[in-house]
């Protein structure tokens, strides 16, 4: 049996927090979607070049990864939204990510709206 619906896009998550990574990937799976975890910009760039990525979810606590670096590494043909999240008390980091071009929110808001974020960016 075939379907005329295109496959869903994949989300990329960059986060050092394994517990939170499980929450994000589990939520995606429950929605019938997929989020893959990557550790660095080089791996993210390689995945973006594949063309099936719908968004990048960036934990601002990730070491050695910034929105500016991620955007610089992103091929023009694979530009996708970057949703960055972090601690609400780290206002400077959140503002820096916003200034670099990401959609930014505190971790609590990201968690509360995660199903909507995933559906909006990954479901077709």
Image (cartoon, rainbow, N blue to C red):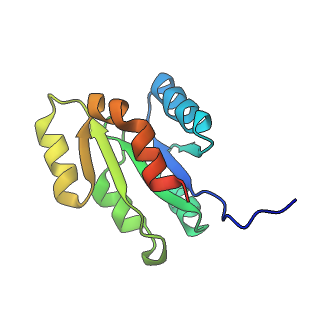
Identity of the residue drawn at 42% across and 64% down: 80
- Image quadrant holding the C terminus, namely bottom right
Which residue is pictured at 43% across the width and 67% down the height?
A: 74
User: Residue 90 or 80: which is nearer the viewer?
Assistant: 80
Q: Position of residue 22 (x, y in %)?
A: 54, 27
Up the image or down, 78 lies above or below 105; here it is: below
Farthest residue in the top direction?
19
Give the camera-side residue of 32 and 52. Answer: 32
Query: Would you say 21 lies left or right of 90 here?
Result: right
Snapshot quadrant of residue 59:
top left
Figure quadrant of the N terminus: bottom right
Identify which residue is drawn at 46% across, 46% down: 118
Q: Within the image, what quadrant is residue 6 found in?
A: bottom right
Please give the name of the residue rendered at 57% of the width and 30% of the height, measured from the top-left corner: 26
Q: Is residue 11 above or below residue 78?
A: above
Indicate the position of residue 50 as horizontal and vertical percent values.
61, 67
Q: Does residue 123 lie above or below 37 as drawn?
A: below
Query: Residue furthest toward the right?
Result: 1
Question: In the rendered picture of this protein, how many numbered marks are placed on residues?
Answer: 0
Q: Residue furthest bottom?
A: 77
Residue 62 shows up from this direction: no
Percent x, y for residue 83? 34, 49
Q: Nearer the viewer, residue 118 or 41?
A: 118
Residue 97 visible to an observer of this rendering: yes
59 on left or right of 109: right
- Residue 88 coordinates in the image, percent (x, y): 18, 30
């Amino acid at each position: 049996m075939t379907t005329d619906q295109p496959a869903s896009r994949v989300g990329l998550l960059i986060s050092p927090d394994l517990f939170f990574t499980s929450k994000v990937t589990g939520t995606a799976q429950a929605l019938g979607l997929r989020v893959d975890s990557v550790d660095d910009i080089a791996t993210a760039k390689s995945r973006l070049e594949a063309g099936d990525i719908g968004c990048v979810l960036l934990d601002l606590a990730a070491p050695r990864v910034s929105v500016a670096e991620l955007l610089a590494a992103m091929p023009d043909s694979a530009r996708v939204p970057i949703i960055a999240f972090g601690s609400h008390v780290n206002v400077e980091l959140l503002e820096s990510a916003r200034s670099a071009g990401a959609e930014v929110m505190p971790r609590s808001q990201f968690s509360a709206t995660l199903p909507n974020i995933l559906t909006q960016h990954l479901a077709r």
